[in-house]
Image (cartoon, grey):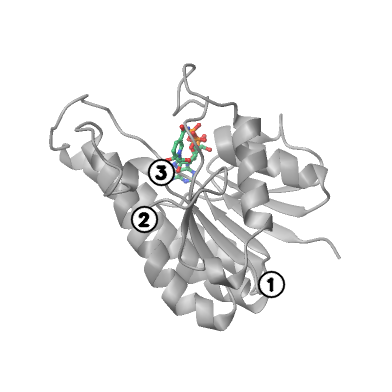
Amino acid sequence: MSKTVLIAGASRGIGLEFAVQYAAEDWHVIAGCRAPEQAKGWAPANVDLQTLDVTDVNSVAALSWHFDDAPLDLLIVNAGVFGPDTGSFAAPGDDTFDAVMHTNVLGPMRLIQAFGSCVARAGGVIAVMSSKMGSITETSGTDALAYRCSKAAANMLVKVAANELGPQGATVISLHPGWVRTDMGGPNAAISVSESVEGLRKVIDDLSADDNGCFLDYTGRKLSW
Ligand SMILES: NC(=O)c1ccc[n+]([C@@H]2O[C@H](COP(=O)([O-])OP(=O)(O)OC[C@H]3O[C@@H](n4cnc5c(N)ncnc54)[C@H](OP(=O)(O)O)[C@@H]3O)[C@@H](O)[C@H]2O)c1
């Protein structure tokens, strides 16, 4: 039987590439997008496009009801926003703070709460798309304050979710995809989206239960929190 992956935030960039690559290997791909009708142009025929706005509690609940507690081999919590980058230390405005934290932190919390038991029952993986910019140890810059704080918070979420769901059978990890040429990463980023996702898929494939609660980059290197 084919494996099932739910990708939250699959309309473009890294999430879209995950959908394309897993669909090519005959996974049952559920692609959660804010505007699924716009994704019809790119989606391979075997991708199940579903409406999902991770900032909307009703949207997450609706997808979870649709899913009806079916076992889930892989949940990729990918949706993310960067917010305006001031380039130097600056507190964000209320709207920026809310948008970044709701998308990058509260959304992932709700997704893991809604689908965690489906993943645990399948002995599956929850992969949260974090960033090296959320590593407190590795931070030397002063820019992107809201984004950095949101990814550090997402890392804490991974640890707590790993403690909760690991004993139930899930493996919960934080991932850094590299600096990737997407709308977010920009045209000068270091690697292509296919290189990033090929690496991330290998990392996910090679996981064992001992990796529960780890922070890994797309090459499999362990990152410090
Ligand atoms: N690119 C990099 O260099 C890099 C580096 C480190 C970490 N990351 C992380 O990797 C993830 C993907 O990044 P990317 O580079 O692919 O970004 P991207 O090209 O900007 O794409 C972001 C994706 O997230 C979706 N999204 C945003 N808000 C959403 C919401 N409320 N509900 C559902 N989907 C939502 C977008 O959907 P719409 O089309 O509807 O906006 C889009 O599919 C992010 O979490 C990002 O922080 C990226």
Which marked residue is nearer to the observer: mark 2 or mark 3?
3
Name the kind of residue labelled 2 in the image.
Ala
Tell me if I can see residue 68 in this picture.
yes
- Relative to 9, does residue 153 appear above or below in the rendering? below
- Relative to 5, does residue 142 appear above or below in the rendering? above
Crowd rating for badge 1 (residues with CA inside 10 Å; few <14, some 14–19, many 20+): many
* Residue identified by numbered label 1: 71
**Which quadrant holds the N terminus?**
bottom right
What is the distance, in whole Å, between disc 2 and disc 1 at their CAs? Answer: 24 Å
User: Residue sitting at 69 percent across and 72 percent down?
Assistant: 70
Q: Quadrant of residue 38?
A: top right
| Residue nearest the viewer, comparing 2 with 223 | 223
Image coords of residue 35 (percent x, y): 56, 39
CB atoms of marks 2 and 1 within 8 Å: no
| Residue nearest the viewer, comparing 71 with 193 | 193
Apparent side of residue 150 relative to residue 51 in the rendered image (left or right):
left
Image coords of residue 67 (percent x, y): 65, 66
- Relative to 189, does residue 203 appear above or below in the rendering? below
Which residue occupies the extreme top position in the image? 188
User: Residue sitting at 34 percent across and 40 percent down?
Assistant: 133
* Residue identified by numbered label 3: 131
> Helix or strand or loop: what does disc 2 sit on?
helix
**Which quadrant holds the C terminus?**
bottom left
In terms of sequence position, does the residue under pointer 2 or pointer 3 come before the other?
A: 3
Crowd rating for badge 3 (residues with CA inside 10 Å; few <14, some 14–19, many 20+): many
* Residue identified by numbered label 2: 154
Name the kind of residue labelled 3 in the image.
Ser
Which marked residue is nearer to the observer: mark 2 or mark 1?
2
What is the distance, in whole Å, between disc 1 and disc 3 at their CAs? Answer: 28 Å
> Helix or strand or loop: what does disc 1 sit on?
loop
User: Residue sitting at 24 percent across and 41 percent down?
Assistant: 146
Is the C-beta of the residue carrying label 3 under 8 Å from the nearest atom of ligand 1? yes
